[in-house]
Image (spheres, rainbow, N blue to C red):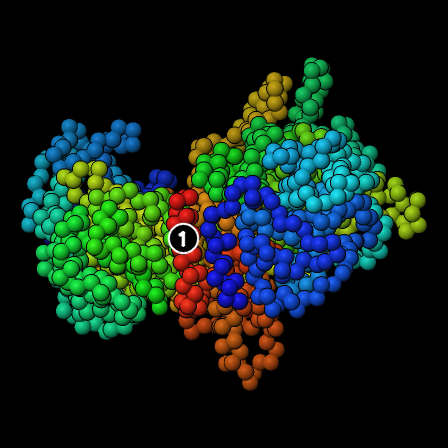
Amino acid sequence: VSVPTGERVLEEAAGARQRCGNGGGSVPGTLLCTDRPLPTLPQAPGSRGLIHAEGEVALPCIHKLVAGNGDIFSKPKVLTAASTLKFIPEELAVFCRDFRLLHFYFPENGLAPQAFRVSQGGAEVLYSLWGTPRLWGSLTPHPWLPSQVANAIAQAREAAAWLGDTAEGPDGWSYPSEASPEEEEEEEGLSTTLLFESLRDWEKELQRLGAAGWRVSAVNERFDMAPSLPQYLWVPSGLLDHDLKRTFAHFQERRVPVSAWAGPGRVGGTGRGMWRHHPISLAAPVAAPWSCKVGAPGWEMEKDGGGWKGAPPHCLVPPEPSDRDLNCLLASLVQLLGDPHARSLPGFQSLVQREWVAAGHPFPRRLGLLCRDAPREEAPVFLLFLDCTWQLLWQFPADFGFTEAFLLALHDSSFSPYFSTFRFSCQRHQGTQGGLLGPCQPRPGLLLPGTAGPCIRLWHRCYLRGLPQEQVLGKLGPGGSALGGSRLGGPSLGGSQPVLLLGLGVRLDLTRVHPGNPVSVSSSRDRWMDGGR
Amino acid sequence: MRLGVAALPRNSSFRCLPAQDERWEPPPPPRAGAMLGGGARAAKPSFVSYISPEEIHIKEPIEKEVNPHLLPGELLLCEASTVYKYMQEDGSNRGTYGKLVCTNFKISFLDDDSASDDNEPQFKNKIVGENDITLQCVDQIYGVYDEKKKLLTGQLRKYPEKLIIYCKDLRVFNFCLRYTKEEEVKRIVSGIVHHSQTPKLLKRLFLFSYASAAPNNTDGRNQTVMFETLEDWRDELERTKGNVKYKAVTTNEGYRVSEKLPLYFVVPMCISEENILKYDGRGIPIWCWSCHNGAALLKMSAFPKEQDDSTSQTQKAFLDGIYKTISKPPYELLKVDDLSSSLPSLQDIQTAYTRFKQLFLIDNSTDFWATDVKWFSLLESTNWLEIIRRVLKKAIEVAECLEIQHTNVVLIEESATDLCCVISSLVQVMMDSYSRTKSGFQSLIQKEWVIGGHCFLDRCNHLHKSEKEEAPVFLLLLNCVWQLVQQYPPAFEFTETYLTVLSDSLYVPIFSTFFFNSQHQRDTNKSGESLKTQSGPFRFLTVWDWSVQFDPKAQAFLNNPLYAEKPKPDKSQRKTTRFKHQRQLSLPLTQAKPSTKRGFFREETDHLIKNILGKRIGKFINCSDEPPNSLREFYESWHSKPVDYHGLLLPRIDGPEIKVWAQRYLRWIPEAQLHGGGTIATAAKILDLMEEVQSLQVKMDEERSQAVSGDVHSVPMLRNSARLSSLFPFALLQRQSVKPALPTSTWKDLEDEDDLVKRDDEFVDLSGDML
């Protein structure tokens, strides 16, 4: 079996078949459970697709493992690391957090259960199916133990979760350990994603926003003031570090109000922390930016306040014990509406980096990646944000510099253990840009999303992608329906640029355009997702 | 202008509304004789003028009588002045004074200010203006008495101070009559109610006065096949290659067979004239369309349930004979589908639509936001989308029988003019790419609906004869077709705007198309009057002549610029692909296999005949031995292949794929609009790109080609305005100033008006608390 170098196969079962769709068809292949050391992944020759290949699923992405004996959906047996099987499983279903359902069966040999311990050596374990007949043919047959694989998967999953937990501290991914030097030296400008790990990033962003009256404070550089706040903070320039230090104690988790964003020409910001409950010395400087939060008075407040289904209005946010959930959500949404730069790909990444990663959103806990955490801690706040962003994207497809595929990739990579944050996009940009970047330069101006019921849609390419009919080639997505206007015909259209992508699933294939056929539009998520292949 | 811009947000997007009672209070009318000037408006603080004072003063206060624009044959019946029309959109008391008139064609509000029509919408209907409601378009009228709404029908004893008119095209008009003279109120209210809500004689339809008064010279033959002549039917048979096994008959000339059947229609060759005449055309399979593999879609009107045993025995025997004849070679196997048992009833459809349209008939913004909280559950509870889904599913079933199982399908219904029309039209739209062109679609409607005998008068209740007969069957078809249009835009030559406009035309009584129950009714009424008038028989307009309603510029909105036209030189190629398709999907056309099946079928027929005696004619006969999930397989295998926009087209019918036809249903609701967004933004972008490509091409070919198409500048509307409404082109009919997109640059203007900003900040909190 050819696995990328540096990757070790922990367990495997050949003679497996993966079911496709409801039609009863299946693909033969080998089921593998591997470990894959983190650093090699982006360059790994075997890395297919954007995040993962069709038959691949990262262990943290597994929601549920179910074994069965031909009756997997009627009498499912959920597998955990501790569970031992009392029967010989012939079928294995993997329910993924990215809404895929992988369904395997072992026609030749459903074999005896046998406990199998996975060595704890690798922090990252990858489980993959090599569904191509070519690979299958190259295998040498030996007795396969599907149940071993199942157990290995279940155990490795929990091991991965624990390891991730201990290695990265209570907040898991919150503190990307250190930025690699070459990224630091990357070309500057609007096209770079700022990781907000260095003072320079914070200063650069403040400069871009032209926010006079604010400054970057390094008061928390060693995380000694507030462990969950970023190293660097934007604070009113009138406020000295000395004063700032005194106020830390007044806030829960010592999180002081800091600025999140400044509108052009006018200083604004989103208060962090429970400032309303501590109207202390800071109240004055904080209240000011709050009341004129964005330049156009209150438009966005209104939108945020009433708009987002599911997100409580900002003014009515019940006192959050920590400000790292809904505040992240609303602060980033406001910026998406008001700041065209945030609607470009690097801008959006910087935004997530600043408002979510640096601000300390507890990703693993909220996404339920840490098994020992109480389920009550689980709340898909970040996924809610992605859905909100998708709503904006479908409402304003021409205003975004990235595509739905990007959001999907981001959605799925939330469950991938490889990426501390956006490193993947920095390094993988070259190959996949075509699929992620929209053709549109975000236009200046505010976006006013429709918040009425009819304007809110189901993100079906995300949630329904497990359904066979969603995985269709050459179908026009919802973004393609249109229009008034008159026919464009006439001269033959030939283009140097073969394919243009629009924000929402519309693909304009200019190579197919010829006189009799004014234009063909087609879209396919799968094709873009294949961008890197 | 600065003042205007600064003050805008307050009225538009903030939902802080004046107190309830204040809201209903219009500002006092202008002094008699004086035109409404800027002063009058500025005096009322809740008004926001979007015109700078200078602009207003330029306008001379002209004493001018506003007169309604009357069509030929249109008579002014009553009028009332100083009527105040609220602007629906923001729920405030903004509005305009004007004159409300009622003619024998429409109810019309004449804006006192309408003299300066600089805000001319680009997509304008020439017949029905922004403030016109044709009498047939009125759905319900409510009067408001002391804040209580009451439905107005028939005789009135007390006259309301406010009038709310709900239209069938989902507009809502609010008129305040407080400042109108009492006699005028009486006259206009009873006039409107009488002319739009009480039963009417057919001859009182405006259609007739218009046809006799207007010289009809719009005889330009358009490409739509009208199916009024034998020739048309023969051509259609030839086009679909159905002429081998089916024939057009003249049996119904003089309506000898039935007044419900068209003059000419098509039946299987083997059906004799006696058979057709025997039961007034009942029990006779009537041809709708032939598939490329020879399988045909037929429809049949069922026998009514008979109490008498011997009658039903003979009917049974008759049917038995018919089935036997048409299931012999050369005819294919036969499947019978009784739509009255496999689809929702007309009552269900009517109930669902009545509930559904209530979601969009919104009095004002407050009501909208109040119901919006429950939008999804309300939508679900209407069941309308589920009905659309079931109809689409049925159409897929029929398509599978024709395409894969290679069987003839007979749709059965009591009169074969309601759900039969829906299913047969849908099947043709899905299977015949000609039906996806504009003229093809129009011919289809003509064939299946207008000539086919759909009772438009009764189903739309145009004459207010009986509410029981009302059912939005044709709208159901348009809704289903819209689903296909939005799922596969490049496959259709027309746009959703076309469908919206077509649905509106249902209520414009100058076209004969949707105002008769049958061809017979039309013919008799057309000639009956002819003796009295010198001009000869009426020459009614057909709705397919779009130039009557729209000028060429507006007509452009009906054509899909992204239509993937059939490449002409590739004709031979297409045939081969079809062949391939056939080989892959259809049963082989050998004689042997079907004959074995035929034996099987006979048993089934016997079974069927046993059933007929019992209760219903023909349940769905599963004449094949295929597993029941063959339909699912067909659906999934089709969806797993790339779409051929000129081939078979199957709608996606999984829950989230069935959507609300936003353009038709939400177009008058500004809250549901996206400025600069929605699908129209994508379309605009695509057109931009295409234009750019074209212009680059032109530059490259400059020396060579001078015959570059001039079409490039026929999309200026999409190009020039940077941010269009998602409900374009309809939203343009609304006042545009409601929710402007604020460019970032205006923030700078706000800088030096700190007090304004602060005031608006107060609104911020207010709005937050209200939510």
Front-most of residues B360 and A215 = A215
Residue at the image position 81 percent from the left and 45 percent from the top: B77
Q: Is residue B173 visible?
A: yes
Residue A168 at x, y = what percent? 11, 52
Residue at the image position 67 percent from the left and 58 percent from the top: B36
Residue B232 at x, y = what percent? 74, 49
Type of the residue with mark 1: Glu
Chain designation of label 1: B
On the rendered image, what quadrant is the C terminus of chain B found in? top left
Q: Which residue is mark 1?
A: B762
Residue B43 at x, y = what percent? 59, 56
Is residue A263 toward the left or the right of residue B237 in the image?
left
Give the total of numbered labels.
1
Residue A434 at x, y = what percent? 34, 65
Q: Is residue B644 visible?
A: no
Front-most of residues A506 and A70 = A506
Residue at the image position 22 percent from the left and 66 percent from the top: A237
Residue at the image position 79 percent from the left and 53 percent from the top: B71
Is residue A464 positioned above or below A222 on the image? above
Is residue B121 toward the left or the right of residue B90 in the image?
right
Residue at the extreme bottom of the image, as rendered: B703
Is residue B89 toward the left or the right of residue A163 in the image?
right
Front-most of residues B77 and B715 = B77
Mark 1: secondary structure? helix
Q: Residues within 10 Å of mark 1 (few under 14, many from 20)?
A: some
